[in-house]
Image (spheres, helix red, strand yellow):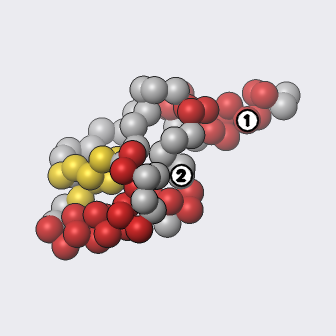
Amino acid sequence: MFFDMHHPSDSRYGTQYRSAIFVYSEEQKQLAEAACKKRGSVGELVKIEDASDFYRGEEYHQKYVEKATSRRYA
């Protein structure tokens, strides 16, 4: 699903947004590694990291793509 919704080399979002999969277990890590390997060079652009505390971004960051698209066509 990650790769269906997101392409790690997409530069529309700038360099401040990284492509990462955050995992909670060794099993998830293995699944993520297998998915990245299956994607070849695109999968190599994705970092796999242990999950940590999550903090929701400020409201202006929410639904960024939708907001950017609506401004572009307004």
Say what amino acid the circle numbered 1 marks: Thr
Determine the residue positioned at 68% across, 31% down.
Answer: 68
Q: How many residues crowd around disc 1 within 10 Å: few (fewer than 14), some, or many (20 or more)?
A: few
Determine the residue positioned at 14% across, 68% down.
Answer: 26
Say what amino acid the circle numbered 2 marks: His
Earlier-in-chain disc, 2 versus 1? 2
Disc 2 from disc 1: Cα separation: 16 Å
* Residue 6, label in figure: 2
* Residue 69, label in figure: 1
Q: Could you say which quadrant of the image residue 36 lies in?
A: bottom left
- In the rendered structure, the answer to whether residue 35 lies left or right of residue 33 reads right
Residue placed most toward the observer, 45 or 61: 45
Q: How many residues crowd around disc 2 within 10 Å: few (fewer than 14), some, or many (20 or more)?
A: few
- In the rendered structure, the answer to whether residue 52 lies left or right of residue 13 reads left
Q: Is residue 64 above or below residue 71?
A: below
Determine the residue positioned at 78% across, 28% down.
Answer: 72
